[in-house]
Image (cartoon, helix red, strand yellow):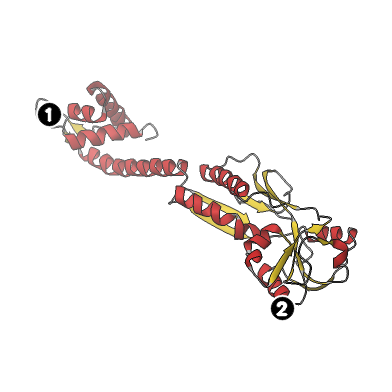
């Protein structure tokens, strides 16, 4: 049975449905001799005739062995058609993609990426996971957004620089940039000491700012709520500020820092040496476009 090929079964099924070798050949676009050769190869593989050939105008009749082969052969042909359709849909971008993300990207960049992917490929299956560990691993993910470079066998593209801004209550500071030294001993709410936060706070200290951290949380909305409540100011990246629409909030004010704190870098990673699906390749292209459309945040 290892010698049975799908083309043999296709020719056999066509003859059974058309009633003659000639009509089956015309339907398949083969010569009649080619169809005859394929049936002969099938009969050799299964060890017996699949047709009775009465000759003349009378139609070829399927033998009992042929009926068995035809039933199972049609199942194989249907599965082959399903496989072909699935491959074509995969190539067209209708597969599954697993993307790792984090809070700011989830709010600002990823919604546009997801929307465009779904518009272009309505049948795609997008799975998202939001984590921001100290030592991220791409694992089984197709793509991973991260505010820095992920170690290991990965390829990456830098999407943008994400500068830090001061968010304070309206009127807490004069309009315009705020010098770092002005933040010394000022109460501040902040992210936990992971990812880029330690480096950012070290940069504040080098600029003469040693704020009193009165609250830490990884949730941007909670930090901003505490700023509104007057608990303290916050130093947050531009993406976080934009994602929360802070600049449209009359209770808050946004200021550049002088000297500027080094911006964090937003990268998109994918496994090195692994063939990307068309969907993942397109997601990378869209992410680069979306980041460019955000403009220069500096």
Coordinates of residue 221 in the picture (x, y in percent): 66, 70
Label 2: few (<14), some (14–19) or many (≥20) C-alpha neighbours in 10 Å: few
Residue topped by disc 1: 54
Secondary structure of the residue carrying tag 1 is loop
Of all residues, the one furthest to the front in this rendering is 175
Task: Tell me if 254 is positioned left or right of 70 in this view.
Answer: right
Sequence-wise, which precedes: disc 2 or disc 1?
Answer: 1
Could you tell me if residue 269 is visible in this image? yes
Q: Are marks 2 and 1 in contact (CB under 8 Å)?
A: no
Q: Where, by quadrant of the figure, is residue 178 drawn?
A: bottom right
Pick the residue in front: 163 or 7.
163
Closest to the observer: 282 or 223?
A: 223
Q: Which residue is mark 2?
A: 229
Quarter placement of the N terminus: top left
Residue at 64% from the left image edge and 51% from the top image edge: 144
Which residue is rendered at x = 59% and y = 53% of the image? 99
Percent across and percent down for residue 260 are: 81, 55
């Amino acid at each position: 049975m290892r010698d049975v090929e799908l083309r043999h079964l296709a020719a056999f099924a066509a003859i059974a449905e058309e009633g003659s070798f000639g009509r089956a050949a015309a339907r398949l676009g083969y010569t009649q001799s080619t169809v005859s050769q394929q049936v002969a190869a099938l009969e050799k593989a299964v060890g017996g005739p699949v047709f009775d050939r009465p000759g003349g105008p009378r139609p070829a009749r399927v033998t009992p062995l042929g009926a068995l082969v035809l039933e199972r052969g049609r199942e194989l042909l249907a599965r082959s058609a399903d496989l072909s359709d699935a491959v074509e849909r995969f190539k067209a971008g209708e597969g599954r993609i697993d993307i790792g993300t984090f809070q700011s990207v989830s709010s600002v960049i990823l919604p546009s990426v997801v929307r465009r992917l779904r518009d272009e490929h309505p049948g795609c299956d997008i799975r998202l996971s939001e984590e921001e560990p100290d030592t991220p691993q791409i694992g089984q993910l197709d793509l991973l957004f991260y505010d820095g470079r992920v170690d290991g066998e990965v390829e990456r593209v830098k999407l943008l620089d994400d500068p830090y801004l001061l968010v304070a209550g309206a009127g807490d500071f004069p309009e315009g940039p705020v010098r770092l030294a002005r933040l010394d001993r000022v109460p501040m709410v902040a992210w936990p000491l992971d990812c880029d936060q330690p480096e950012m706070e070290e940069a504040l200290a080098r600029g003469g700012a040693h704020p009193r951290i009165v609250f830490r949380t990884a949730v941007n909305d909670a930090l901003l709520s505490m700023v509104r409540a007057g608990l303290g100011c916050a130093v947050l990246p531009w993406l976080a500020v934009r994602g929360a629409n802070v600049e449209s909030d009359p209770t808050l004010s946004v200021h550049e820092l002088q000297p500027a704190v080094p911006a964090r870098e937003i990268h998109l990673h994918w496994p090195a040496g692994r063939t990307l699906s068309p969907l993942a390749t397109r997601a990378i292209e869209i992410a680069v476009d979306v980041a460019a459309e955000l403009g220069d945040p500096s």
